[in-house]
Image (cartoon, rainbow, N blue to C red):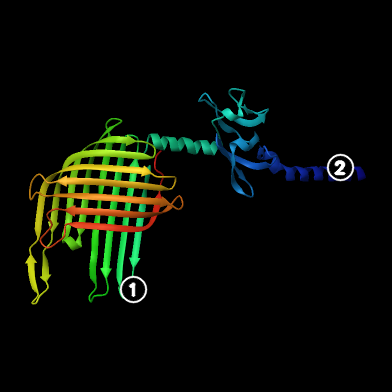
């Protein structure tokens, strides 16, 4: 009876020790060159770093060059230097990665020649992302920015100016869709009643298709309204062709040209001239329609790891109707604070050569404020 009791206690202690050691035995292990060891679940690795999910510290990223050995209890997908991939339990022996596969037996390769390690979940996510890039749907691959700025004064002056602009881009190797919008509003509260000093809303949609590595075709429609110009609505439809002068990883420069049709609807307004005595003049609503040419350029560059500069200029000479010309100039410098947050400075200049009587043709804006970023631009 006493012997049975002793055997029972030994079995219980062995079971308890097994339960305590089980998490370590079933976990992946990464040993570093400095002797440290991490246990958990290997998520992924490439030629630069390894990511392991630990029970208490979450995901930990380690430089691949600091890794001495890897031992996995789960199958990993291993990228070989010849472009092939094998899957199986991974160990390390004498600087070699050893993969025990079900189909090809044991595969051995140098640790530094491994292209990647991925868990099954990570490999599935990678394959899904590649399919999304190669065969994207209309809702895929969007990225863009939201810029906002606010100026407010009180005391001897009472002014408010608010700017908001947004753009969203869906770009593949063969085409690009751009959706953009800008809004400016300003109010002077020192007068009674308050006076609107700026109120403009503009936006549009543009599509580009690459017909060769250098040449592309484009089509677009833009909308604009400007209360101080008494412009109720402007709609332009245009298209043409362009040339990629520069297509580097950090700098692009495009030239374009084409033709379009411009419609402008100016509302009725009254001008009051100071006296003595003050006089007023009434002007009826005016509608202008004309065909016009389009010549433009756009430039984008990354000045450093955090700051980018974008600039575009478009000239629209009229070729029918009331004649004249117009141009738009836009330039923005943005600096990243975080991956999703930055600070931007924007300058725009919109000019029409034949504005209604008594209205200035130039509208310039200099604004600064926060930039929010969403999505990820393709490499």
Q: CA distance from mark 1 to mark 2?
A: 87 Å
Secondary structure, mark 1, is loop
Task: Check disc 1: other Cα within 10 Å, few if <14, some if 14-19, many if 20+.
Answer: few
Q: Earlier in the sequence, mark 1 or mark 2?
A: 2
Residue 291: percent from left, percent from top: 11, 45
Mark 2 falls on what kind of element? Answer: helix
The numbered mark at residue 154 is: 1
| Residue situated in front as seen by the camera: 212 or 368 | 368
Judge left or right: residue 291 versus residue 17: left
Residue 210 placement, left or right of 126: left
Crowding at dot 2, Cα within 10 Å, few <14 / some 14-19 / many 20+, comes out as: few
Please provide percent x and percent y for residue 225. Answer: 20, 57
Give above or below for 331 relative to 130. Answer: below
Please count the marks in the image: 2
Residue 7: mark in rendering: 2
The quadrant in which residue 345 appears is bottom left
x, y percentage for residue 358? 12, 63
The residue sitting at 37% across, 35% down in the picture is 135
> In the image, 266: left or right of 133?
left
Q: Left or right of 57: which side holds 184?
A: left
Front position among marks 1 and 2: 1
Residue at left offset 8%, top offset 77%:
277
> Does residue 138 appear in the picture of this structure?
no
| Residue 231 in view, yes or no | yes
Image quadrant for the C terminus?
top left
């Amino acid at each position: 009876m006493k012997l049975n009791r002793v055997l029972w206690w030994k079995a219980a202690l062995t079971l308890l020790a097994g339960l305590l050691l089980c998490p370590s035995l079933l976990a992946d292990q990464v040993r570093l060159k400095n002797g440290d060891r991490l246990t958990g679940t290997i998520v992924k690795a490439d030629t630069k770093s390894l990511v392991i999910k630990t029970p208490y510290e979450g995901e930990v990223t380690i430089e691949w060059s600091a890794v001495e050995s890897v031992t996995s209890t789960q199958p990993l997908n291993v990228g070989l230097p010849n472009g092939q991939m094998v899957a199986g339990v991974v160990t390390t022996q004498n600087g070699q990665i050893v993969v025990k596969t079900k189909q090809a037996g044991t595969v051995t390769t140098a640790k530094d020649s491994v292209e990647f390690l991925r868990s099954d979940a990570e490999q599935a996510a990678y394959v899904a992302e590649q399919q999304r890039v190669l065969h994207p749907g209309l809702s895929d691959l969007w990225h863009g920015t939201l810029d906002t700025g606010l100026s407010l004064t009180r005391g001897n002056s009472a002014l408010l100016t608010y700017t908001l602009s947004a753009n969203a881009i869906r770009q593949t190797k063969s085409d690009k869709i751009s959706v953009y919008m800008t809004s400016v509003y300003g109010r002077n509260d020192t007068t009674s009643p308050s006076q609107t000093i700026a109120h403009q809303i503009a936006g549009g949609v543009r599509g580009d298709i690459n017909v060769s590595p250098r040449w592309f075709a484009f089509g677009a429609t833009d909308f604009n309204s400007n209360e101080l110009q008494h412009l109720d609505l402007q709609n332009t439809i245009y298209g043409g062709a362009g040339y990629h002068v520069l297509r580097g990883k950090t700098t692009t420069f495009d030239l374009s040209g084409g033709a379009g049709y411009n419609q402008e609807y100016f509302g009725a307004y009254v001008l009051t001239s100071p006296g003595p005595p003050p006089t007023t003049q009434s002007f009826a609503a005016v509608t202008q329609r004309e065909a016009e040419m389009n010549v433009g350029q756009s430039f984008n560059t990354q000045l450093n790891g955090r700051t980018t500069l974008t600039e575009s200029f478009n000239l629209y000479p009229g070729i029918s109707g009331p004649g004249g010309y117009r141009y738009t100039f836009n330039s923005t410098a943005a600096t990243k604070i975080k991956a999703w947050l930055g600070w931007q400075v924007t300058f725009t200049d919109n000019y029409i050569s034949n504005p209604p009587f008594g209205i200035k043709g130039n509208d310039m804006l200099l604004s600064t404020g926060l930039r929010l970023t969403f999505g990820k631009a393709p490499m």
